[in-house]
Amino acid sequence: METREWNEGAGDIWWREVAGPHKYVKEIARAILDQQCLAMDADLDDDVFTESLKDRISSYDCDCHYVRIAADDFDDVNAFTAFIAQQYAPQFRFDPLDESPLTSLIRQSGLQHYVFFVDSASGDCPWLAQAAAAVGRLAGREGSAWVFRAPSPVLAAWDKMAGVHLLDRKHYLYHYDIQYFAMTCLRDTELNLRQQYYAADIIAKIAGMDGRLCLALARQDLYFHPEIVIQEQKLSVDLVPILLETQMQHVLPILEDIRRYLVRKYETMIQQILPQQDEYGKELNRPTDLELRHLQHYLRGQGLFFQEKDDEWFQCAYQARNDISHLNVLPTDQLDKLFYIQQKIH
């Protein structure tokens, strides 16, 4: 999966299988089928997304025609209107009772089952908002659907434009969507399942909502040498806080599993040396009250040790607990030991 191109399968997983992006496609398809006027970010120029959207629409309306128009090629809204009329509505006649030629054009029955994608990659198209407002006023009442795509700063000014629906991907995509996609991308690597979970969590924190970046990061090397992968992708990311947060989320539950395992297995021995209070005055009434630091302090103080394997596990957990407490990033070999112990305990 590391070399898998977006257009050769990964993009299909993103738009058709991952919950958030899949719901986003469904919402857009439904709005188009309802002849709504939509506004979307111009950076969503993705052939796989477009094909997924078409497939969704075609399952309900197989007569749909899709037209993509570069808005930046036209000087004004009238030139834009004339082009559409010439190409797709040759019988068009302007109705003087309408407020503009574009309004008359939208009312043309010949444009039924058409979906117009009007793109302004630059965002410098001065008439785009005028066209969107005209379409928005008639949205849902005529036969065509319109999708205006422009940079986010341009769309922000359209927030209260009547009849224009802004579908923001941020409202559909969640952290677990990226994690799921990253896990899918890591599936064919040699990482074991626990290593994949850990790497996928790091990827999700770095990639945010960017599925393509998620795919680029989803490599086996991200687990072993994350700093190298970040450099290769030319990303400006402070890795240390991300690694620390991820290790706390994944390692602390393992340390608790090890603590409980040792307390259960050596309860009788622990009971014999259990003090009334720890060095900070905390009441210690049961073996289950003991933390890893208690086991280290009191058992070692009495010259007591666990069985060889268990003692190795304890030392690994205790060292990891100290490192994380001092905000030190654990090396990969230490993580591997902890993941191995977790697997054996369960």
Image: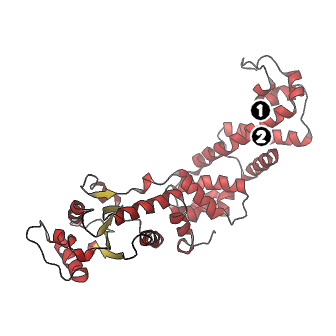
Q: Nearer the viewer, residue 104 or 264?
A: 104
Can you give x and y, in whole percent of width and height, for residue 51 in the image? 46, 73
Q: Residue at x 35, y 75 (%)?
A: 66
Give the quadrant of the C terminus.
top right
Which numbered disc, 1 or 2, marks the residue that appears first in the sequence?
A: 1
Q: Nearer the viewer, residue 150 or 326?
A: 150
Q: Is residue 291 above or below residue 213?
A: above
Q: CA distance from mark 1 to mark 2?
A: 8 Å
- State the residue lying farthest toward the left: 96
Image check: 33 left or right of 173?
A: left
Can you give x and y, in whole percent of width and height, for residue 95 in the image? 11, 72
Name the colour scheme: secondary structure
**How many C-alpha atoms fall within 10 Å of the one at disc 2: few (<14), some, or many (≥20)?**
many
Tell me, for residue 317, which label it has, or none.
2
Q: Residue at x 83, y 42 (%)?
A: 313
Q: Residue at x 48, y 54 (%)?
A: 173
Q: Disc 2 residue type? A: Ala
Q: Nearer the viewer, residue 141 or 271?
A: 141
Q: Is residue 74 visible?
A: no
Can you give x and y, in whole percent of width and height, for residue 231 in the image? 57, 61
Q: Are marks 1 and 2 in contact (CB under 8 Å)?
A: yes
Can you give x and y, in whole percent of width and height, for residue 3 in the image? 62, 72
**In which quarter of the view is residue 10 placed?**
bottom right
Q: Disc 1 residue type? A: Leu
